Image (spheres, coloured by chain):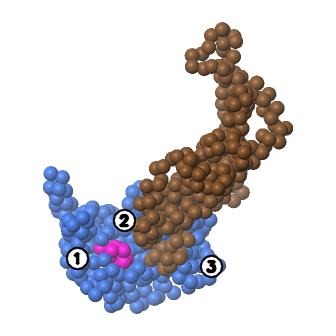
Chain colours: A brown, B blue
Amino acid sequence: MTATKKSFFAKFTGQVTLKRGVSAILIFLVIWHVGALFDDWFGVDIIGIGLVPPPADVFAAFLEVIPKIGYWQSWVSSFSRVLTGFLVAMLIGIPFGLLLAVNRYFRGLFFPPFEILRPIPPLAWVPASLIFWPTNEMSIAFVTFLGAFFTIVINVLGGARSIDISYLRAAQSMGASQFDLFWKIVLPGTLPSIFTGAAVGMGITWEVVLAAEMISGGGTQGGGGLGFFIWNSYMGGSLEQIVVGMISIGIAGYLSSSAIRKLGYFMMPWRRLF
Amino acid sequence: MTKEKHRNSGLGALSIKNVTKVYDPEGVNVLAVDDCSMEIAGGEVCMIVGPSGCGKTTLLNAIAGFHSVTEGSIHLDGDLLCGPSKPLADQGADRMVVFQHGALFPWKTLQENVAYGPMVQKVLAPREAMDKASTMLAEAGLGSFLTKYPGEVSSGMARRAEIVRALINDPKVLLLDEPYRAMDALTKQIMHESLLETYDRTGVTIFFITHDLEEAIFLGDKVHIVTTRPCQLKKTVEVKIPRPRSYETQSSEAFRKLLEEVSDAVHEEAVKAFQAGEREMA
C-alpha cells in the first residue's frame, strides 16, 4: 500500500515533471511578454495582435483585486453554480444512464426524447429558461445542469453497455443475483466511464456558467460570478482585469478537474497502475 | 475432499446427444452445430479440436447455459441441462467457464475475485471465503499476489487465478475455451503443468477447447476432433499415456504417433474450412 502511495506522489511531484511544468509556464510568460511589448520596442505590431496587457501589468491587477471582497464573491457564486448544476446532473444522470443501459423498456421509452434534446446546445436554452424559471439564479443553474447532464448520461450509457459480457456470464455462473450483478459488476465496470463523463461534464459546466453569467449576470437579481467579472471589466475598459478573470477561470477549472481526478484515484484503486 | 468426491464417484459425466444449433441473425440461418453427439465420462479430460469458427464455442456455450440448443439434449450426471422441453440450460456453479479472453473482474484483487463465488452464493461467510481463497491461491503458487489486481499480474498468473476462481465453487465440470491462446510456448508449458497438477488433485471433469494439437494430446484422456462448420464429431482419439505426465512425455514415441493421427484428421478439416472460407469470400 505504502509503495503505491509513494510512487503516486513521486510521479506528480517528481523533480523532472515539476521542472518541465515550471519551465513550460515560464516560457509561455516570456512569449506573452515579448508579444505584448513588441510594438513598444520595435514600433510595429505583430500582425493580428492589438493591445494585449503584458504579464507584469496583469500581475499588478491581480494583486489589486485579491484583497477585494467582490472578486472572491465572484469565485464563490461561480463555484456554487457549477457545483449545484454538476451535482444535480450527476445525481440524476448516473441512475438515468444506468437504467437506460440495463432496462430495455426504459431505453425504448426514454432514449428517443433524450436523443432529440441532446443536440440542443445548453446556451440555446438560455432565453427559454430565463422566461420559464422564476429567478435568474435558477435559470443559470438549470442551463448549467443541462450542460453536464447529457454528457454524463451518454458516458454512463456507453460505459455500461460496453462491459465485457464474459464478466456478466462469469458472475451469473458463480451464482450472482440480479442485485449482485448490478452493484458488483455493472456499477464498478461503469465507474471509469462515469469519471470520464464527470471530467468532460465539469468542463462543459464551467463554459456554460461563464456564458450564462455574461448574458444574464448584469441584471439586478442573481448576477455576479467570474463571467460577470470579465464582462464588467470589459464594460469598464480594464484590459488587465479581463485577463485576471480569464486566468481565474483557468485556475478554477483546473481545481475542479483535479478534484475529480483525485476522487477517481481513490474510488478506482485498480486503475492506479495506469 | 474434492479429490475423493470426483475420483470415487465419477461425477461430472456429460452426455451430449444429437445437439443441433441454428443461429438466425437477420433471417439468414447459420447451422453452427449439426447433430453432434459426445459422451464424456466423469473425471475425464476431454479435448475438443477443430478449425476456427467451427462451432466449438457454441457447444461450450450450450453446456454453460449461455446459448440455447435448437435440437438435441445435454445431460450432466443423468440430469437434463437442456433439451427439447428446455432449450436453454440454467447457469450454475456446477459448470464453471474459463473464458477465451479472461474474465477476472479487473476491479477486484485476485483474492476478492476467487472469494466472489462462495460469497454471492452465501455458502461461506465473507471472512471464510477470503481465507479459503487465499489458501487455494497459495496452492496454485499465487500466495504472494493475493492483493494484486488482475491488471498487475502476468497473463499466465491471471489465467491460473481464473482457474482457481472456478475451482473454489467445486464444479463438476470445468469448461475451458482456448485459455492459453496467445501465450508463448514457455508460459504455456508452465500452464499445462499447473493444470495437470490441479487435475491430479481434484479429478474434475475438463471440457477443453483448443487449436493446439500437442496441448490436446499432452493434457487429454480423449481428443475429439470436430468437423468444420457445421460442427460434428469426426473422430475420437484416445490418449493412453499414463498419468502423471511430464514434460518428457512429449518426446516419447507414443506421443509422436498420436500427434500424427490427430494431425491427419485435423488437416483435412482445416483444408475444407479454408476452401469454404474462399467460397464465402468469392
State yes or no: residue B63 in magenta: yes
Earlier sequence position, callout 1 versus callout 3: 1
In this rendering, would B192 be left or right of A208?
Answer: left
Q: Is residue A259 above or below residue B94?
A: above
Give the amino acid type for the residue marked by disc 2 in the picture.
Glu
Find the distance from the CA under tag 1 to the CA under tag 3.
42 Å
Give the amino acid type for the residue marked by disc 3 in the picture.
Pro
State which region is magenta. Answer: B59-67
State yes or no: residue A178 in magenta: no
Q: Is residue B122 above or below residue B265?
A: below
Residue contact at pointers 1 and 2, CB within 8 angstroms:
no
In this rendering, would A51 be left or right of B251?
Answer: right
| Residue B199 screen position, x and y as percent | 43, 76
Q: Which residue is mark 3?
A: B126
Foreground tag (1 vs 2): 1
Q: Residue at x 62, y 52 (%)?
A: A139
Residue B20: numbered disc: 1
